[in-house]
Image: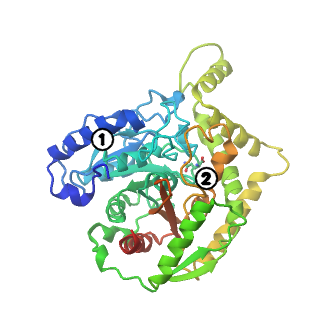
């Protein structure tokens, strides 16, 4: 639909015709759905290579040298990136070009792209509904044919959830597969850059290019298994004997009837096709969301303390140091960001005697161990990406808890640092997309991508 741009489609076209196609789609869709915050002046990338002529959008929290990266926040409204993100350099090095920067929830905190100073991104399938978030602009840029690959970030679901809501594929790699250099930090131990695309093959090829050990990000590593995907023939993959763990009991993590029915239907199709499906109870899944908020808020409060209006952020010269900082933050940050900074500051305060942060760290280790055990018995866990289908614009904007509940199935992958992908494998009765998430153990990205490709071929 809507003239999407796949890698296969690009092969037969010239740069000129691709850019014409993009410009037409921008004209048709951008003001209607509020996808791109800024379109760049781009030209053919002379490098050539594996991604020649591939159009890319970048989320507004990813650096592209000399271009604004505002995180959809007033506090960084005019901030220009002093260098390009490692992954952006890699993509440009293989002939891709960057169309523009996409809308997002401020500092990537949100699940609907409604917390943006630029206004909400609307769901291109039906503009009464949200596009998901925080990478809502990224997902919308794919399905409206503005880009072939959209870079976003995923701290607790921000790639997978908007991909699910818009009907795209969204991949969050294992922590460390992509360097975080040039991604504005939200919660450093959970943040990963991820990819939204039209299909698994395009994503895998881009991931092979983006992956690498960046000397400036010590948590990054080179994954040789991923590298070979650049030229891999996905149709030759068999992977029949893989075991998929599925959930049968949603009493601890409630989901809507519609999602439940669609999930059951998917499982019965898998059974019919002789996939190996076993019933599991993902350990501590019901604790993952509160745990996520403790970890993410604590780290966010620390990371965002650099926006003081002096070195970073809205500068002003009114009054003494404290007055200046206060003014910059009061005017610079939106409500949701303030809420999280306050919560994170409380959690990490000295003398805060219930020691939530320390307990959260311990629980995180326990969860990791439990999922290591689970992944020694199954290859993949299949879950709904979201507990509900896309909701209406404005519906959850004043109800933070309802907004957070969207992430019931996505934060676990960030907590244990594993890889996960949302696949568009369902539709609501109203025609809105439903995504299902396949999760694998850390460093099993190549298997996850190959198996997802096969699933999409068999079921999509
Ligand atoms: N929706 C989640 C949140 O609000 C996750 C955001 C993200 O992954 N950046 O924190």
> Relative to 10, is 297 above or below?
above
Can you identify the residue that label 2 sits on?
A: 406
Mark 2 and ligand 1: say if the CB distance to the nearest ligand atom is below 8 Å.
Answer: yes
Q: Nearer the viewer, residue 418 or 275?
A: 275
Q: Is residue 419 left or right of residue 57?
A: right
Q: Position of residue 101 (x, y in %)?
A: 38, 39
Q: Nearer the viewer, residue 299 or 276?
A: 276
Q: Does label 1 or label 2 sit earlier along the sequence?
A: 1
Q: Is residue 20 left or right of residue 344?
A: left
Tell me the residue at 58%/61% (across/down). 258
For this orientation, the residue located farthest to the front is 429
Q: In the rendered image, which quarter is residue 20 located in?
A: top left
Tell me the residue at 30%/41% (across/down). 99
Mark 1 and ligand 1: say if the CB distance to the nearest ligand atom is below 8 Å.
Answer: no
Element marked by disc 2: helix
Q: Position of residue 235 (x, y in %)?
A: 29, 76
Report how far apart the C-alphas of labels 1 and 2 lie in the structure.
30 Å
> Relative to 139, is 250 above or below?
below
Q: Position of residue 301 (x, y in %)?
A: 65, 40
Can you identify the residue that label 1 sits on?
A: 99
Tell me the residue at 59%/48% (across/down). 187
Element marked by disc 1: strand
The reply to whether residue 332 is visible in this rendering is yes
The reply to whether residue 383 is visible in this rendering is no
For this orientation, the residue located farthest to the right is 353
> Relative to 85, is 78 above or below?
above
> Relative to 50, is 114 above or below?
above
Q: Position of residue 207 (x, y in %)?
A: 37, 61
């Amino acid at each position: 639909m809507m003239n999407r741009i796949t890698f296969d489609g690009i092969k037969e076209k010239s740069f000129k015709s691709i850019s014409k196609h993009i410009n037409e789609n921008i004209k048709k869709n951008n003001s209607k759905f509020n996808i791109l915050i800024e379109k760049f002046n781009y030209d053919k990338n002379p490098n050539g290579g594996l991604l020649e002529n591939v159009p890319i959008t970048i989320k507004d929290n990813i650096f592209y040298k000399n271009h604004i990266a505002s995180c959809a926040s007033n506090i960084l409204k005019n901030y220009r990136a002093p260098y390009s993100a490692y992954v952006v350099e890699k993509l440009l090095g293989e002939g891709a070009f960057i169309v523009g920067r996409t809308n997002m929830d401020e500092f990537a905190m949100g699940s609907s792209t409604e917390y943006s100073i630029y206004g909400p991104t609307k769901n291109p399938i039906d503009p009464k509904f949200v596009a998901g978030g925080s990478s809502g602009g990224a997902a919308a840029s794919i399905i409206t044919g503005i880009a072939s690959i959209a870079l976003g970030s995923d701290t607790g679901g921000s790639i997978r959830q908007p991909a699910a809501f818009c009907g795209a594929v969204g991949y969050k790699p294992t922590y460390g597969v992509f360097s975080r250099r040039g991604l504005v930090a939200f919660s450093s131990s959970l943040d990963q850059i991820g990819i939204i695309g039209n299909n698994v093959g395009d994503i895998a090829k881009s991931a092979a290019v983006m992956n690498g050990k960046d000397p400036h990000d010590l948590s990054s590593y080179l994954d040789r298994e991923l590298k070979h995907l650049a030229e891999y023939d996905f149709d030759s993959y068999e992977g029949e004997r893989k075991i998929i763990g599925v959930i049968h009991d949603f009493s601890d993590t409630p989901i809507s009837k519609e999602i439940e029915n669609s999930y059951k239907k998917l499982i019965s199709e898998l059974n019919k096709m002789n996939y190996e499906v076993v019933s599991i109870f993902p350990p501590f899944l019901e604790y993952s969301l509160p745990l996520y908020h403790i970890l993410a808020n604590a780290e966010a409060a620390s990371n965002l303390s650099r926006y003081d209006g002096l070195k970073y952020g809205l500068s002003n010269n009114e009054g003494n140091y404290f007055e200046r900082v206060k003014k910059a933050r009061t005017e610079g940050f939106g409500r949701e960001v303030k809420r999280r900074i306050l919560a994170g500051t409380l959690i990490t305060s000295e003398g805060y005697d219930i020691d939530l942060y320390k307990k959260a760290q311990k629980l995180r280790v326990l969860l990791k161990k439990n999922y290591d055990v689970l992944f020694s018995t199954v290859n993949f866990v299949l879950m709904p990406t979201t507990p509900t289908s896309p909701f209406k614009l404005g519906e959850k904007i004043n109800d933070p808890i309802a907004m957070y509940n969207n992430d019931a199935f996505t934060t676990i992958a960030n907590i244990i640092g594993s890889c996960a992908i949302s696949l568009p494998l369902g539709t609501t009765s109203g025609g809105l997309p439903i995504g299902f998430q396949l999760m694998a153990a850390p460093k099993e990205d190549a298997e996850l991508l190959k198996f997802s490709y096969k699933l999409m071929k068999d079921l999509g």
